[in-house]
């Protein structure tokens, strides 16, 4: 598993706030982990594009996440 | 995974790299968290820097640039291997580095190799890029690299392997960015480079090591995906696409400018370095220096003459001793036996103790020679003796006979024995050897002084001055270019801000599809959060590094109390120590050295990976007390970091001048943090004609 600087993850946690559902934090964690993997290791550009399209597609359909985003 | 990944060197294997001949076998590094220090100890010139460079070359494919930027004529491969390579027998040089993580799993293995063979007969020396030096034309060298790494998609111990040089280079650049080498492969001599740095090298390194670009890259990807969503969902596709294209184009220009600026800064910095060298040359070779050089040459030539005279004198002395004593030495036995015989004859009254006229006449009448021969049968001899006696008894024969007796006696009594004569000759030879050694030194000195003078002639000061002027113009041009590009960048940033606002408005007005709107809203939220994180973290990182640097520097820095704080430039990340008083006074080299160590240590607090740290000459510029202070802080300040020190005698062992203080070794031992301790030993390898070859080996410290 690729390592994301814990300070970055802490900062994300701090910015989204304690009231944010865990799904929001997990979404960020997933994005950063995949990006770290892409940054460090050779990954196909297509795979990365697919990942971002996929996470946006799934997360935008997640009512918990969207409810939180809309509430901001 | 939220913890910091620890990277430790498990082992390094070297074959035929510079001073190292043959396969070293795996040299193990300490991976014990409680005793994380590995020591390589050796006197200067024994291969400490070669070992350091072997690791650097293994990772980056090139050696660490030295402070004086000297180009080494010797190549990377051991000279004995180059000089003795045979037809049809291939050889190789390689460096293999195994790196493991905190779970003691092998994370990376890098094996970089140069394959060698002999082809053709051309013996003239040519510069080989692969071998990094001059080698005979018949040497053919090829690079090879194999990189194995843990599969990021798998949690088992399986390693993926690649030997495609482009892929390997790209992977290694990402794992060990070139800028990061400053943070884990350190040259003690270069620690003060972190101060007042005016290029973007340090800044980029710190940003990369702290993984800040990760946030920026994620923003770019989210933005791209979101825009794509918009293209398919907008009711005003033309305007949407046009604005989007406009933004993309401007972003490309901005990214290029962002890339160009550090490059220009780095080029400017290189030009400034060259100018510094040029100025130093001018200062070094001014008229006074030339005069001093010439005077020195004259003084040394006089000394040389004196030495020649001394050698000649001693040689003459030996000659005299030999010539003066050779006959006595060789005749000593004969003289001794003659003397004994004479004394015996005197006792037996066969010969007189004094030769007078009467006695000689009596002897003649006995008709017997002193040697016992009967003279009766030799009338000529009797007549001759009688003639001589009649001419002058006392003044000639008698006196001569007495003289012979006396001289024989003298020689027997006073001649030196063999031992004392040999001793005197030996002493003269010792003197000659001493003078000869001194003569070699003086000749060498004269040669180097003359070379310096020749260099001044060759390099022509005027040319240096002209080049310096050219450099000044180039620096000015670069500065202007950087200024212009910065202005363009600033205006582009403003334009992009406006365009982004326009684009956002357009999105809101033209995208009505609910799901698409959700996606874009979410993307917008992600973008904003990541951007904010980047902005805040950057600021916090600078503050954290600043405070951690200050904390360690104030504890261990030489006379640190004269400084009130440490400051880090938020744009360049260059570090400086601020004095309480005498603000214009420069920081000393020792202070800069400890500041560098403190800075690097502080940077580790914000990094994703806790990289191993190898320092060549870590205690080079600092006093014994400061060395001890730094060592005392290691258990707390470098927690979890694998430390490797390449140290000289004077750095590591007890300091004679400050014998009341413990040595670095004693201090590290006291804290029980030395895990592996090695000595670098140089041994003769071979002698071919007049060329002597040596090899360095790594042996356990004793």
Image: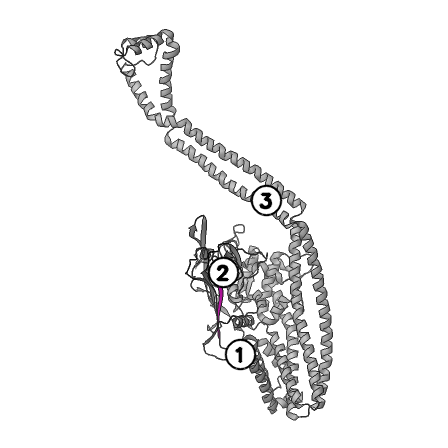
Q: Chain of mark 2?
A: B
Disc number placed over residue B450 in the picture, else none: 3
Give the spatial CA distance, label 2 vs label 3: 34 Å
Residue at screen point 68% across, 56% down: B585
Q: Which residue is mark 1?
A: B1
Q: Nearer the viewer, residue B328 or B31?
A: B328
**Between marks 2 and 3 in the image, the one whose residue lies nearer the viewer:** 3
To the question of a shared chain for discs 1 and 3, the answer is yes
Task: Find out whether the residues at labels 1 and 3 contact each other: C-beta distance under 8 Å.
Answer: no
**Between marks 1 and 3 in the image, the one whose residue lies nearer the viewer:** 3
**Quadrant (top left/top right/bottom left/bottom right) for the C terminus of chain B:** bottom left
Q: Which residue is mark 2?
A: B51
**Residue B642 percent coordinates (x, y):** 51, 67
Give the spatial CA distance, label 1 vs label 2: 34 Å
Q: Is residue A48 magenta?
A: no
Give the spatial CA distance, label 1 vs label 3: 64 Å
Q: Earlier in the sequence, mark 1 or mark 2?
A: 1
Point out the residue furthest to the top here.
B390
**Residue B23 percent coordinates (x, y):** 42, 61
Assign a secondary structure to mark 2.
helix
* Way the structure is coloured: one colour
């Amino acid at each position: 598993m690729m390592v994301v600087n814990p300070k970055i993850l802490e900062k994300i946690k701090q910015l989204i706030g304690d009231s944010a559902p865990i799904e929001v934090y997990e979404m960020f964690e997933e994005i950063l982990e995949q990006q770290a993997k892409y940054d460090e290791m050779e990954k196909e550009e297509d795979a990365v594009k697919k990942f971002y399209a996929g996470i946006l597609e799934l997360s935008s359909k997640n009512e918990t996440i969207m409810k939180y985003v809309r509430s901001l | 995974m939220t913890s910091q990944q620890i990277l430790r060197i498990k082992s390094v294997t070297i074959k035929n790299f510079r001073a190292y001949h043959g396969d070293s076998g795996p040299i193990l590094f300490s991976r014990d968290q409680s005793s994380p220090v590995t020591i390589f100890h050796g006197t200067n010139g024994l291969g400490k820097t070669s070992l350091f460079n072997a690791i650097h070359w293994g990772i980056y494919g090139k050696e660490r640039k030295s402070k004086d930027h000297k180009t080494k004529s010797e190549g990377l491969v051991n000279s004995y291997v180059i000089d003795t390579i045979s037809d049809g027998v291939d050889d190789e040089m390689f460096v293999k580095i195994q790196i493991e993580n905190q779970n003691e799993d092998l994370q990376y293995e890098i094996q970089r190799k140069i394959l060698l063979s002999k082809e053709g007969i051309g013996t003239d020396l040519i510069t080989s890029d692969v071998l990094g030096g001059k080698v005979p034309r018949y040497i053919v060298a090829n690079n090879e690299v194999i990189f194995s790494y843990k599969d990021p998609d798998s949690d088992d111990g399986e390693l993926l392997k690649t030997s495609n040089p482009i892929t390997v280079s790209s992977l290694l650049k990402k794992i060990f960015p070139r800028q990061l080498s400053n943070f884990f492969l350190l040259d003690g001599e270069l620690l003060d480079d972190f101060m007042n740095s005016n290029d973007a090298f340090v800044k980029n390194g710190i940003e990369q090591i702290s993984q800040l670009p990760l946030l920026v890259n994620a923003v770019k990807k989210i933005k791209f995906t979101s825009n794509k969503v918009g293209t398919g969902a907008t009711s005003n596709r033309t305007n949407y696409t046009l604005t989007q294209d406009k933004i993309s184009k401007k972003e490309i220009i901005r990214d290029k400018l962002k890339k160009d600026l550090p490059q220009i800064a780095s080029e400017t910095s290189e030009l400034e370095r060259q100018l510094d060298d040029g100025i130093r040359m001018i200062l070094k070779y001014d008229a006074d220096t030339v005069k001093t050089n010439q005077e020195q040459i004259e003084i040394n030539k006089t000394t040389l003459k004196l030495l020649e005279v001394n050698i000649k004198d001693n040689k003459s002395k030996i000659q005299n001793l030999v010539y003066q004593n050779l006959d006595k030495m060789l005749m000593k036995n004969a003289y001794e036996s003659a003397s004994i015989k004479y004394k015996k004859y005197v006792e037996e009254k066969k010969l007189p103790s004094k030769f007078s006229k009467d006695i000689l006449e009596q002897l003649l009448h006995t008709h017997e020679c002193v040697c016992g021969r009967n003279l009766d049968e030799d009338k000529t001899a009797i007549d001759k003796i009688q003639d001589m006696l009649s001419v002058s008894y006392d003044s000639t024969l008698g006196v001569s006979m007495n003289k012979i007796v006396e001289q024989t006696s003298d020689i027997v009594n006073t001649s030196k024995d063999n031992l004392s004569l040999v001793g005197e000759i030996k002493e003269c030879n010792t003197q000659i050897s001493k003078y000869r050694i001194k003569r070699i030194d003086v000749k060498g000195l004269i040669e180097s002084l003359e070379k310096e003078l020749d260099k001044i002639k060759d390099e022509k000061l005027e040319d240096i001055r002209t080049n310096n002027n050219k450099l000044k113009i180039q620096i000015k041009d670069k500065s202007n270019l950087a200024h212009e590009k910065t202005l363009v960048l600033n205006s582009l940033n403003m334009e992009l801000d406006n365009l982004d606002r326009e684009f956002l408005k357009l999105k809101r007005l033209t995208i009505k599809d609910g799901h698409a709107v959700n996606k874009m809203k979410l993307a917008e939220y992600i973008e904003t959060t990541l951007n904010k994180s980047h902005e805040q973290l950057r600021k916090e990182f600078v503050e954290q590094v600043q405070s951690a640097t200050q904390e360690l520097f104030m504890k261990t820095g030489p006379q640190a109390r004269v400084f009130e704080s440490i400051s880090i430039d938020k744009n360049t990340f260059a570090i400086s120590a601020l004095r309480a008083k005498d603000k214009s006074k420069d920081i000393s080299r020792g202070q800069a050295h400890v500041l560098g160590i403190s800075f690097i240590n502080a940077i580790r607090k914000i990094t994703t990976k806790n990289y191993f740290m190898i320092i060549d000459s870590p205690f080079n510029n600092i006093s014994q007390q400061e060395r001890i202070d730094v060592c005392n802080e290691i258990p707390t300040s470098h927690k979890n970091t694998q430390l490797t020190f390449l140290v000289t005698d004077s750095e590591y062992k007890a300091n004679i001048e400050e014998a009341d203080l413990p040595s670095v070794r004693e201090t590290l031992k006291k804290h029980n943090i030395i895990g592996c301790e090695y000595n670098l030993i140089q041994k003769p390898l071979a002698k071919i004609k007049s060329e002597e070859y040596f090899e360095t080996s790594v042996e356990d410290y004793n």
